[in-house]
Image (spheres, rainbow, N blue to C red):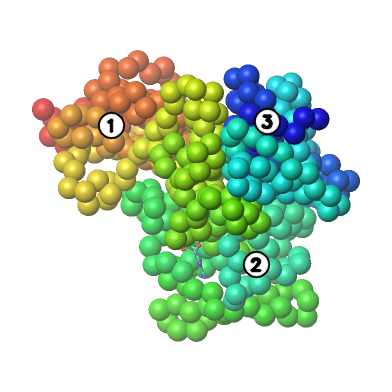
Amino acid sequence: MSDKFDVIVIGAGPGGYVAAIRAAQLGLKTACVEKWVDEKGGAVLGGTCLNVGCIPSKALLESTHQFHNAQHADVHGIQVSGDVTMDVKAMVARKDKIVGNLTMGVAGLFKANGVTLLQGMGKLHGGKKVEVTAADGSSATYEAENVILASGSVPVEIPPAPLTEGLILDNEGALNIDETPKRLGVIGAGVIGLEMGSVWARLGTEVTVLEAMDDFLAAADKDVAKEAAKLFKKQNLDIKLGARCTGTEVIGGKEVKVKYTDANGDQEIVVDKLIVAVGRKPQTQGLLADDSGVNLDERGFIFVNEQCQTGVPGVYAIGDSVRGPMLAHKASEEGIMVADIIAGHHAQMNYDVIPNIIYTHPELAWVGKTEQELKAEGAKIKVGKFPFAANGRAMAANETDGFVKMIACEETDRVLGVHIVSGIASELIGQAAIAMEFCSSAEDLQMTVFAHPTVSEAIHEAALAVDGHAIHMANRKKRK
Ligand SMILES: NC(=O)c1ccc[n+]([C@@H]2O[C@H](COP(=O)([O-])OP(=O)(O)OC[C@H]3O[C@@H](n4cnc5c(N)ncnc54)[C@H](O)[C@@H]3O)[C@@H](O)[C@H]2O)c1
């Protein structure tokens, strides 16, 4: 194998593998370095997202949602004789099969596109040389015209709750719990905490979530956070705000005492499993040799500009290891942008229109700015909100919780943010993202024909409501 490439990508997660495929499609001789190996020594492709993140968590969320629906099928007149039961081991095995198929799929795509896979830990040296050290310690050095660093992130660990096999778990361990715990503790009411808490609450586990901040879902629009808090309470997710974990103690090797402080002083709970989900940090350990020339910022992220260029010409960084939201789709889009730039195309990414989704039920999704952010900026805005309780298709689907909230500029009518709580918010938000990418006004959406009966009509109605013209509800606003 020749040791010179046009592009070497370090990391085969959703940032790295997408960048490698795009670069190869554009005719560039491309290699992708991945250190993750399975128990047989085979390369594990797809990174956190495919293996221990987005995909496996969605498999568990889907299985437990189906279980919940089966338990409540009587709303449709369906009678289930006997108890509906869940075989947790079968659920976990199904999840593993989906993950296996997808990671094999990435290997197939590398082959089909002519991407060379280099197995081992990649380290960038000066002169765009990449040293790859295999699991057996052997190493080889390759040269590239361009290097894309896509090393991802790792979970933050906190001293009061050190990971303990089978008891105190990070996101990876949380995905492999193979029997329903009676009591589950979760530290952090963020994305992972809420998603994994939902999985087990649906199976009957008593779930307590400890959140250090006083505000619930501080990054979300306040209307979304308020609605979500109300609905999660009904789902037996006990979310304690202003509750900071101060220590843990494993009792008898089978349960965990979790100590925390809140407004009332020192507290404790005892749980069978504890999931720590307090955020992630960039993974850069061992990635950069002293002479690489690449700098980190004050928070440990690889320092890049808007086009993901580091300070070294021809060296780029993308995904969780650089500034911006830690989201797979953001990483993939950065990968495509960088591959295009390397191939000499004009490319840029719109960081203002990146959808955020929390896959609870209902799902919480938003794109653009919140009402609070816009007001803090002094923007003049108009807001339209439409509830699913007034949408016929949502009623037919027994999915009447939630709403669509649209925010537009008072002066230009441009849509600035869309916030959705819905059983299928993750799918609906794509419509808002497309509209915003094309700089849509609320009027553009008002004049668009939405099919009836669909849940999407709530987007149309929210756009109409921006000007007090919603049809299927009484408008609070004065019509112009
Ligand atoms: N659906 C998705 O898009 C998805 C799913 C999973 C993960 N992710 C990404 O993975 C990353 C990690 O997710 P996450 O849920 O771990 O992080 P997060 O940042 O979403 O939430 C962590 C929460 O933990 C709280 N916290 C921190 N220290 C605490 C302490 N000592 N005691 C109690 N609470 C504490 C924080 O205030 C915060 O609310 C996020 O960046 C997220 O975007 C995304």
Rate crowding at label 3 as few (under 14), some (14 to 19) or many (20 or more) other CA atoms within 10 Å: some
Per the image, label 2 sits on a secondary structure element best described as strand
User: Of label 1 and label 3, which has the lower sequence position?
Assistant: 3
Amino acid type, callout 2: Leu
Whether ligand 1 has any atom under 8 Å from the Cβ at mark 2 is answered as: no
The foreground one among 21 and 474 is: 21
Q: Which mark is residue 415?
A: 1
Which residue is depicted at the point 60% across and 75% down? 159
Count of marks placed on residues: 3
Q: Give the CA distance from mark 1 to mark 2.
A: 41 Å
Residue drawn at x 14%, y 32% as measured from the top left: 411
The type of residue carrying mark 1 is Val
Residue 5, numbered circle: 3
Asked if the residue at tag 3 contacts the one at tag 1, i.e. Cβ–Cβ closer than 8 Å, the answer is no
Q: Secondary structure at mark 1?
A: strand
Nearer to us: label 3 or label 2: 3
Q: Secondary structure at mark 3?
A: strand
198 and 15: which is toward the camera: 15
In this view, the residue farthest toward the right is 40
Q: Residue at x 61, y 41 (%)?
A: 128
| Residue 168: percent from left, percent from top | 68, 68
Q: Do we see residue 243 in this rendering? A: yes
Q: Quadrant of residue 114?
A: top right
Of badges 1 and 3, the one in the foreground is: 3
| N-terminal-most mark, 3 or 2 | 3
Q: Is residue 79 left or right of residue 305?
A: right
Determine which residue is flagged by label 2.
Answer: 274
Q: Residue at x 63, y 54 (%)?
A: 289
The C terminus lies in quadrant: top left
The picture quadrant where one finds residue 478 is top left
